[in-house]
Amino acid sequence: GWEGRGGGGAGGGGGGGGLHLDAKELAKLVGERWRALSDEEKAPWAEQARVDRARYEEELKAHIDAHERAQACGRGDGGAAGEEQEAAGAGETRAEEAAEEKAESMEEAMEEGGE
């Protein structure tokens, strides 16, 4: 387990008996443990990542399709409401792109052994 890791109290957490880590130290420990796993031990996690990625892509497509249908219905008035919907849609698209980039980078990190 995690016992004995971090030199008896990593992160400068004095006393308390618990292991106190900041985000950087925790990420380092998790990365070390991930790299220490065999391919066989990593397989269930890789499969879960594949399943989650497929679900994410399906949900994203459904969301984008629904958003495009809503925009198509809202464009008929040609007024400010359509412009507001269009502006909101641009923001969602950027958020969706950012989420997809994050998912891809996490997946790549897992494939590279956490480095």
Image (cartoon, rainbow, N blue to C red):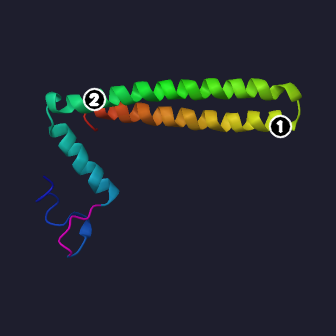
State whether residue 90 appears in this view. Answer: yes
Q: Is any atom of residue 112 visible in this view? A: no
Quarter of the figure with the C terminus? top left
Horizontally, residue 31 falls left or right of residue 69, namely left
> Which disc number belongs to residue 81?
1
Residue beneath the point at 17% across and 71% down:
17
Up the image or down, 46 lies above or below 31; here it is above
Residue under label 2, please give it: 46
Q: Main secondary structure of the magenta part?
A: loop
Mark sitting on residue 18: none
Q: Is residue 9 left or right of 53 when viewed as pictured?
A: left
Q: Which residue is painted at 75% across and 35% down in the image?
A: 85
Q: Position of residue 10 (x, y in %)?
A: 21, 63
Query: On the picture, is 93 further left or further right than 56?
Result: right
Instruction: Answer few, some or many: residues within 10 Å of disc 2's Cα (few below 14, many 20 plus, some between 14 and 19).
Output: some
| Element carrying mark 2 | helix
Amino acid of disc 2? Ala
- Pointer 2 or 1: first along the chain: 2
Range covered by the magenta-colored residues = 16-21
Look at the image and say whether residue 89 sits in the magenta stretch: no
Secondary structure of the residue carrying numbered label 1: helix
Q: Horizontal and vertical percent for residue 69?
A: 70, 24
| Amino acid type, callout 1 | Ala
Picture quadrant of residue 114: top left
